[in-house]
Each structure stands twice: as C-alpha cells, then as structure tokens.
C-alpha cells in the first residue's frame, strides 16, 4: 500500500502527517509530491502561519521503503534518481518556505526521515525518540540533505560516526548539540510542537519570513553581504503595517494584532 501525507489544520497551523504505518511511515514519491503541493498551497494561504510535520503512530519515519528500493534496482538508474529528486524538491521547499516548519518526532527518525526532520526550522522530539542515519547499514549513502545539515551543525568526527557507523543518537544528546529545540514526554511531541507553533503564530509573519531568509543566506554570505541584507529586511519590516502595530502595541503595553 502506498503511503500518504495527511493534511489537517489546528488553528493557524497546518499539520502534515506521514501516513504509511505498515512500513513505519516510510517515504516515497507520492509523499514527496504531496509535501511540495501542500507547502505551495500553504504559502499563499494567509490563514496558515506555520506548519508541523509529524508521523502517524509511534514512529516518525523509517526513511525509504527498502522493498521499493530493492525493486528499483531492476529498473534504469534514472528511476531512482527521479525519486530522489522528488525528495530533494520537498526538502528544498521546506527550507525556502517563508513560514516556520516544525518537526514533531516520536520514536525513530531513520535515514531520510532524519534528513526530513533536519530540514525543518525547529525540531520537537519525544524523550524516547532516536535518530539514525542508517544508510551505511544497507550499503547506501545519505540523501535528503542529511549530510549537509549534520556537517554544518556537528563536529566532523561525530558526523562521520553517525554516517559511517550508523550509530543511533538520542533526542537528549541532539538537544545538547542544539539540533533539537524541545524534548517532550513520550506521546507528547505533537502537542509540544503545536504549542510552539501557537507562540510563533502570534508573531508577525513578515518578520518571521525575513528571519528565516536571513538564516538561510548567512552561511554563504560575507559579513558585508549579510549586513546589507539585514539592513534591507529591517527597513522593509519597519515600514510594514505590522512594524507599526508591533511598536505601538509594545508602547501601549497591549498584545499586538498582526496581519
């Protein structure tokens, strides 16, 4: 049975649920395409302020479906290349999506499931969650931007161990390295992620979009380029209606009402 990506709303938060429980929410082309489509629609919907990605049941995502991968070995290499391009399109759409995206992880996030969680802006994990780049265990190498994200966030020796040895790492240890933002009790990752989303939803969407863009640009920018970009974003946000509302609300000691 092919997996699906379920879409529901919780206030101003869009919840995308990986739904392939028979295969522990393994990913596939139909989920990648649905993920890109959902984000494209949410980008143009002012009622949606944030997105949470989670998994159905006790496991976030087991990564790729090994049965499908084995079958793809009998097909031209272009078939698997196109599938990975689909995954990468979704990863890129998460990174460039102008609203906050939060991963809510229960149980295991393995392989591309780990990469998917790393692509999100914020990561909430249950205290029993484990993360593993399991590719080398089955003689494969990473996809989904996992090597890119880990190499920029962790020491080289630890990244090498995670990728080459396929070692599991706990939510608590990843939190210590700054890759997990919140650790919740088992079964509570989604609720904690929605609580975090609600806090973000109360802030000015244009300011959050600017912050995400600045964060994305920073690694490739020189200091001078980043200073120029910060200036341009600041001026644009100051002259946005939300800038006036935010300052006025602060001075009047009342909650702001952002659009």
Image (cartoon, grey):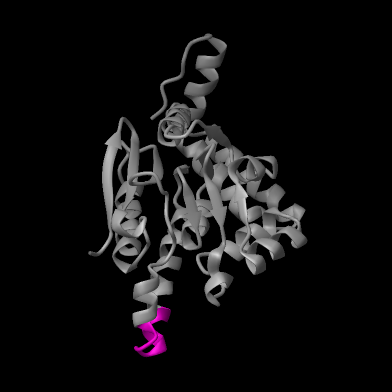
Question: Which of 35 and 23 lies nearest the eye of the viewer?
Answer: 23
- Report the side of 43 relative to 165 (left or right): left
- Classified by dominant secondary structure, the portion drawn in magenta counts as helix
- Please give the range of residues in magenta: 72-81
Residue found farthest to the left = 1
Residue at (34% x, 81% y) in the render: 71
Kindly identify the residue that appears in the image at 68 percent across and 58 percent down: 152
Q: Is residue 106 above or below residue 69?
A: above
Image quarter where the C terminus lies is top left
Q: Position of residue 222 (x, y in %)?
A: 74, 58
**In the rendered view, does 97 fall on the left or right side of 154?**
left
The reply to whether residue 50 is visible in this rendering is: yes
Question: Which residue is at a point 42% across and 54% down the rendered structure image?
Answer: 61
Residue drawn at 52 percent across, 69 percent down: 143
Give the answer, above or below, for where 184 lies relative to 154. Answer: above
Q: Is residue 76 magenta?
A: yes
Residue 187 is inside the magenta segment: no
Rendered-image quadrant of the N terminus: bottom left
| Residue 142 seen by the camera | no
């Amino acid at each position: 049975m092919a997996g699906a990506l379920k879409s529901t709303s919780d206030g101003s938060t869009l919840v995308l649920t990986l739904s392939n429980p028979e295969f522990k929410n393994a990913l596939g082309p139909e989920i990648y395409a649905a993920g890109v489509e959902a984000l494209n629609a949410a980008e143009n919907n002012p009622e949606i302020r944030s997105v949470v990605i989670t998994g159905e049941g006790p496991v976030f995502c087991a990564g790729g479906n090994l049965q499908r991968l084995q079958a793809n070995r009998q097909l031209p290499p272009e078939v698997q290349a196109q599938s990975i391009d689909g995954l990468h399109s979704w990863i890129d759409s998460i990174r460039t999506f102008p609203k906050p995206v939060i991963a809510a992880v229960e149980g295991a996030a393995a392989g591309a499931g780990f990469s998917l969680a790393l692509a999100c802006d914020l990561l909430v994990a249950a205290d029993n969650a484990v993360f593993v780049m399991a590719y080398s265990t089955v003689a494969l190498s990473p996809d989904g931007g996992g090597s890119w994200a880990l190499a920029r966030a962790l020491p080289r020796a630890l990244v090498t161990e995670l990728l080459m040895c396929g070692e599991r790492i706990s939510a608590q240890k990843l939190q210590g390295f700054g890759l997990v933002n919140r650790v919740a009790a088992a079964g509570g990752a989604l609720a904690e992620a929605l609580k975090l989303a609600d806090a973000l939803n109360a802030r000015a969407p244009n300011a959050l979009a600017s912050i995400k863009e600045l964060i994305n640009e920073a690694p490739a920018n020189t200091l001078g380029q980043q200073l120029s970009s910060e200036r341009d974003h600041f001026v644009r946000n100051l002259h946005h209606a939300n800038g006036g509302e935010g300052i006025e609300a602060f001075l009047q000691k009342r909650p702001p009402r952002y659009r």
